Image (cartoon, grey):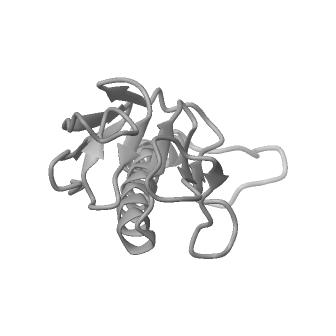
Amino acid sequence: MSRTDTERGFTMIEMIVVMAIAAILAAYAIPRYSSFANATFDGWHDEVVSTLQYARSSAVSHRRLVCITVASQSVSLRIASANPATSCNLDLSGPSGGPAVTSTAKSVATSVSPSGVLYVQSDGRVTTDGAGTTTATFTVSMNGAASITIHGETGHVE
């Protein structure tokens, strides 16, 4: 049976097949899209871990105090110009020569516990003060990604 010009349109079976295919594609694509959104937070997590490890290695290799400031959209590093020091007065250059800053375009609600600036001593320890008197284990928490732990006595980041 052939269609004439006056019988244009889709049959009910064609409509059901197209809707079934669309439903299957949607069921497959929606979970993929949400995991793609989480990949942004995983990328931010990995960048923060790398920045913290870079801070420790810089403090040890330069034998200088490195200060880490964690904000909701960035992690920035500063370094002391002399040793010994209790504060940092220069921006620390990153591996590419620019400032060692990790940032994201959106807020990931990053927080540090205990709060405040993290001080990485020249021996690799992470302390709550520039003088290096009190070591602590710090936790960096983020929405959508696993927390990061910095062990004060060793400076190990995990």
* Residue 132 location (% of width, % of height): 30, 41
Task: Name which residue lies at 27% across and 61% down.
Answer: 123
Give the quarter of the figure containing the N terminus: bottom right
Left or right for 91, reference 42 = right
Residue 22 in view, yes or no: no
Give the quarter of the figure containing the C terminus: bottom left
Left or right for 68, reference 157 = right
* Residue 91 location (% of width, % of height): 65, 54
Left or right for 61, reference 139 = right
Left or right for 135, reference 52 = left
Residue furthest to the right in view is 5
Is 73 situated above or below 1?
Answer: above
Task: Name which residue lies at 67% across and 74% down.
Answer: 97
Near-viewer residue (10 or 80): 80
Task: Name which residue lies at 45% across and 61% down.
Answer: 64
Is 9 situated above or below 112?
Answer: below
Residue 87 in view, yes or no: yes
Report which quarter residue 3 is drawn in: bottom right
Task: Name which residue lies at 26% across and 35% down.
Answer: 139
Residue furthest to the front in view is 84
Near-viewer residue (40 or 58): 58
